[in-house]
Image: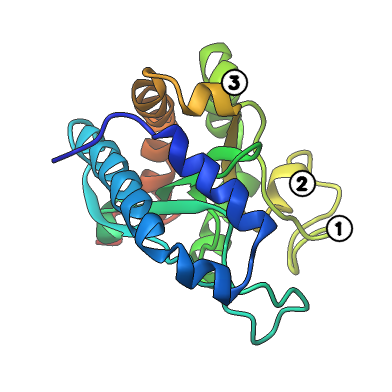
Amino acid sequence: MSNSTIPKDAFNFLKELSKNNNKEWFEQHKPTFKEHEKSVKSFFESVKNNLSHHDEIEKMKMFRIYRDVRFSKDKTPYKTHLAASFARLGAHLRGGYYIHLTPSGSFLATGFWDPNKEDLFRIRKELEMDASEFREIIGEKSFKAIWGELAGDAVKTAPKGFDKEHPDIDLIRKKQFIFIRNFSDKEVLSDTFLQEVDKSYRAIRPYFDLMSDILTTNLNGESLL
């Protein structure tokens, strides 16, 4: 059965975990965690169900609470957030959605956060040739009201083979093409959060449609599929 809200007790548990991030405490409270995990996963299933009405989702992944500390200076064993990703269907669509829930730090993200080498080059070549449609979509008033500005890491000057004086170098420099929307705890715990998540994900669709078109065609507009 799907859940349409985030329980306040789940956030309270994450707050306590941040103060007691050790194996002994977690093992003592693991049954409680499992209940919260089940409830939040049910909420994520509701998000996925809503997405299925206006997009094609290949898979949902809820991330585990356990941290990989092998290469990290931070050796605390547990994450203090709960999160899930939703991958769009295969080669035809690309991109994905992400939801991150934590006290005083919840957000949604969407877009292309780790494009492979070929996809990244294709996006950059498109922007080099003509970035006008891209700018029109991400600059649209109602779009920006929800998602704000394009985010993501970028190279310092220009990617190899691209002119650092190009008028659209601010876009070409990007290594990630993502959008992030932050939420307060009050917003996350409200009865309308599920609807707001879906409203946000619906609003990104013009951007996804353009990027899907770019990544499935060559510079002449011929299909690569």
Residue labelled with disc 3: 144
Q: Secondary structure at mark 1?
A: loop
Which amino acid, mark 3? Answer: Lys
Residue sitting nearer the eye, 216 or 58: 58
Choose the circle earlier in sequence order: 1 or 2. Answer: 1
**Residue on which disc 1 sits:** 157
Q: Is residue 120 depicted above or below 172 in this figure? A: below
- x, y percentage for residue 66? 50, 72
Marks 3 and 2 close (CB-CB < 8 Å): no
Q: Which residue is mark 2?
A: 169
Point 29% across, 37% down: residue: 47
Q: CA distance from mark 3 to mark 1?
A: 26 Å
Query: Which residue is rendered at x = 72% and y = 55% of the image?
Result: 153
Q: Is residue 98 visible to the viewer in this orientation of the structure?
A: yes
| Residue at 56% across, 76% down | 23
Considering only order in the chain, which callout, 2 or 3, is on the residue closer to the N terminus? 3
Farthest residue, direction front: 28
Evaluate if marks 3 and 1 touch, with contact meaning CB atoms under 8 Å apart: no
Whole-number angstrom distance, CA of label 1 to CA of label 2:
8 Å
Secondary structure under badge 2? helix
Q: Amino acid at mark 2?
A: Ile
Tell us which disc is closer to us: 3 or 1. 3
